[in-house]
Amino acid sequence: MAQSSKLDLAEALALGPIWRHACHAMLYAPDPGKLFGRIPLRYAVLMQMRFDGRLGFPGGFVDSQDSCLEDGLNRELRKRLGEAASAFRVERANYRSSDAAVAQQVVAHFYTKQLELEQLVAVEASAPRAREYGLEVLGLVRVPLYTLRDGVGGLPAFLKNSFIGTAREQLQEALHDLGLVDSASSSSPKTSTRESQ
């Protein structure tokens, strides 16, 4: 795993032209549903199974023709999630963090965007028709935000999966900061090294 470091957005944008920028977004929506009629779901949070078998957030690299990070991110969301991603736009106000992988000279920018549940369900339905589906994206998955009575099932078990780069840490921080779960539910050991996203 390669070392990465947090940067603020201004620092990340000031890096030289040899650096590549990738943007990813956590899409989520309030979900009033209940698992087994009794366990509140509270929110639906989307992640994707990537071509390499690891979990990550939808998005990708910003191209030179993109006028800003968010234009690149929204273009990549349409490629990976299908036309339903055209019904909303991730903006600079949705920005959360940037991580630089020095060895790869890649900066990963992370965003969160709250949708209506109907929009999120439409994204799930359109994803199998997206250009990258079955290639770079093997499927979408919802993050279980609950912990079952055994203390293992649900979010604790989900967090034991393999994640790309800083996606696990980004997920945990966003869930906590946005109040989607309590801090005890989203905690797990953090590592000092991270793979490049």
Image (tube, helix red, strand yellow):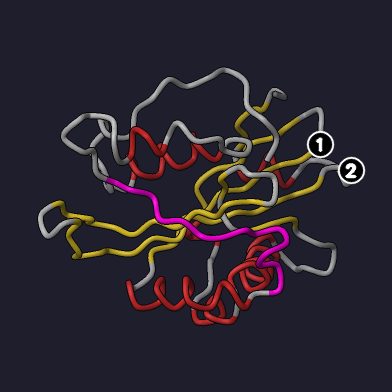
Q: Is residue 143 magenta?
A: yes
Residue that appears at 26% across and 43% down? 181
Q: Position of residue 19 (x, y in %)?
A: 83, 43
Instruction: Decide whether the magenta segment is chiefly helix, strand or loop.
Output: loop
Q: Position of residue 74 (x, y in %)?
A: 62, 69
User: Alpha-carbon neighbours of circle 1 within 10 Å: few (<14), some, or many (≥20)?
Assistant: some
Amino acid type shown at disc 1: Gln
Amino acid type shown at disc 2: Ile
Q: Which residues are magenta?
A: 131-145
Picture quadrant of residue 134: bottom right
Residue farthest left in this picture: 38
Residue that appears at 20% across and 64% down? 33
Q: From the viewer's perspective, is residue 36 above or below residue 182?
A: below
Residue that appears at 33% across and 64% down? 29
Picture quadrant of residue 8: top right
Q: Is residue 112 magenta?
A: no
Q: Residue 141 or 81: which is nearer the viewer?
A: 141
Q: Image check: 63 left or right of 37?
A: right
Q: Residue 167 or 137: which is nearer the viewer?
A: 137
Q: Position of residue 15 (x, y in %)?
A: 79, 40
Residue that appears at 35% across and 78% down? 118
User: Alpha-carbon neighbours of circle 2 within 10 Å: few (<14), some, or many (≥20)?
Assistant: few
| Residue indicated by mark 1 | 105
Q: Residue 164 or 128: which is nearer the viewer?
A: 128
- In what quadrant of the picture does the C terminus appear? top right
Q: Secondary structure at mark 1?
A: loop
| Residue indicated by mark 2 | 18
Q: Image check: 196 left or right of 94?
A: right
